[in-house]
Image: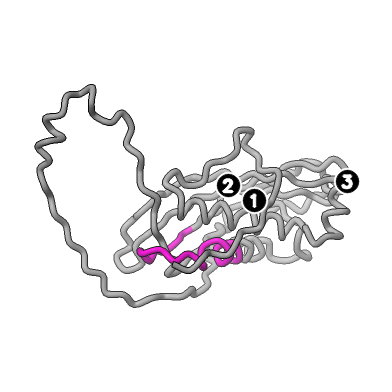
Amino acid sequence: MKRVRLTALMMILGLGVSACATVDTASRNTPMEQMPTEMVAPAPSFQLAGYDVNVPLSLEVSEANSYYPGGDIVWRGDPYGNRYEQIGAIFEDAIQVGASPLQGALPVMVEIELKRFHALTEKTRYSVGGIHSIEFVMTIRDPQTGAVIRGPREIKADLEGYGGSKAIQAEARGLTQKYRITQHLARVIREEMTLATGWVPPKKGVTARIVPLEPVKPI
């Protein structure tokens, strides 16, 4: 197993943690029919203190130029080289774009372990197009104690892969596979860190349109 690590901003904070318990006799005695039927979890308030991206060497890399090659990692958006490191770098960039600007109250450590990264081959990209199939596990921890705050959560973050003339036109506008996938993963990671529900895939399971993230407004 290979770990791809990049030191992120670590903040030394003294956090005073206090807990109190009260008995809400009024709510306890409220008739059942008057009690709320659904409890809505509050949105998390996180800021990035560090991250760790793990791309296991046990994942199989395929360089076959076919419509649907086997393997766990298929990537052509960088020159031929170490695909494990290239995919790790994509996730690191996505974390920086999606999570670094967050200004929440609680510093957290983000851990990502890749399960599958199946982008398009040359043959598929310049003909019919397809789906960038991306799966990973994301865990959010306390950076000091290592305690799990959210997760581990298996995330399936599929993205439409352009093909034919659409791919060529997108490439001319700078919308490369690497740019689109990085922006997509940045949004997935940000929503996992800022929404009560975490990342929720679209109804059909595949994201089609990339909307670059807006800067986080200062508090």
Relative to the observer, which residue lies in front, 107 or 121? 107
Residues tagged 2 and 1 counted as in contact (Cβ below 8 A): yes
User: In the image, which disc is placed on residue 135?
Assistant: 2
What's the residue at 35%, 43% (across, down)? Answer: 41
Does residue 26 lie above or below 117 as drawn?
above
Residues tagged 2 and 3 counted as in contact (Cβ below 8 A): no
Query: Is 161 within the magenta?
Result: no
Q: Earlier in the sequence, mark 3 or mark 1?
A: 1
Q: Secondary structure at mark 2?
A: strand
What's the residue at 80%, 47% (across, down)? Answer: 162
* Dot 3 alpha-carbon crowd within 10 angstroms: few under 14, some 14 to 19, many 20 or more: some
According to the picture, the residue beneath numbered tag 3 turns out to be 164
Determine if residue 219 is in view: yes
Task: Decide if residue 68 is on the left or right side of residue 206.
Answer: right
What's the residue at 72%, 50% (across, down)? Answer: 119
According to the picture, the residue beneath numbered tag 1 turns out to be 117
Q: Earlier in the sequence, mark 2 or mark 3?
A: 2
Give amino acid for label 1: Phe
Residue furthest toward the top? 33
Give amino acid for label 3: Gly
Mark 2–mark 1 distance (CA, rounded to whole Å)? 7 Å
Give amino acid for label 2: Glu
What's the residue at 38%, 51% (across, down)? Answer: 150
Magenta part of the chain: 93-111
